[in-house]
Image (spheres, grey):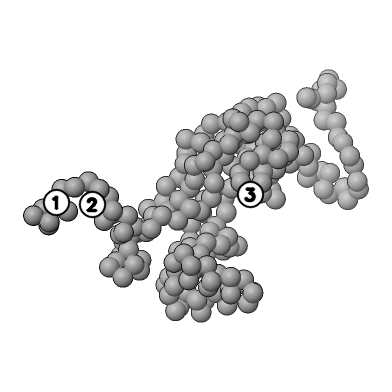
Amino acid sequence: LRVYAAAVDTDYAEAAINERTRKVVLSRSRGTIFDCNMKPLTNANEKTYAVIFDEPQAITTLYNHFHTDEIYDIVEEIRKNGFAVRSVSRKIETEGIYCFDAPVNIDRNTLAKHIIGYTDDRNHGISGLSLAFDSLLYSDKTTSVSFTLDGRGDVLQGERPVIDYDYATSNSGIIITIDKEIQLITENALRSSRKFIPWQVVTISRDGNILD
């Protein structure tokens, strides 16, 4: 009778599934700020994340990619949570480390950052349009990846991790009048001038009209 109840009770079934899977959050989602042509100014780039598990080969490989102090923090995090997540410049291929690309809302390559603004560690806007339209852009959803575990709680070899992208949030947002291509040309020109220029004006060459 006990076996029968465990087989049909949805609470038992859900608990069994949770015991066999581990969900790891890679990045937090936010709505996108689009330019006047619906090209994304935010959520335009990706970052590579490494999910690190407690495997001897994985721990050894860390020394080729991280400083000693950070390795200590990673190992402590693995002991506490069973895994650790770090952003990496390139994918690491070894047993116990799994790498995934996930969208990043704002990074060093984001254009018009003085207008776009920045977010804090809680994923809320703290300046610029990110702050002004935080109620429309903020989301508590994430991009995550789920691993299947064996009876010992280790990642089951042969089972591919399932990544869950939050496309619904990144496909929504606000549209502004900046043209991404013109903004890119302008920022590159200012960067190559090697002079401090606090502002710039872009005109249409055929008639001299100033662009917004």
Report x, y in % for residue 88. 58, 63
Type of amino acid at the residue the image marks with label 3 = Asp
Whether residue 131 is visible here, answered yes or no, is yes
Residue at x 59% of width, y 48% of height: 104
* Residue named by callout 1: 5
Label 1 – label 2 distance at C-alpha: 8 Å
Pair 3/1: label in front: 1
**Viewed as shown, does residue 9 lie left or right of 29?**
left
Type of amino acid at the residue the image marks with label 2 = Tyr
Q: Are marks 1 and 2 in contact (CB under 8 Å)?
A: yes
Marked residue nearer the N-terminal end (2 or 3): 2
Q: Quadrant of residue 116?
A: top right
175 lies above or below 51: above
Report x, y in % for residue 17. 28, 54
* Residue named by callout 3: 121
Marked residue nearer the N-terminal end (3 or 1): 1
Label 2 – label 3 distance at C-alpha: 36 Å
**Viewed as shown, does residue 56 lie left or right of 119?**
left
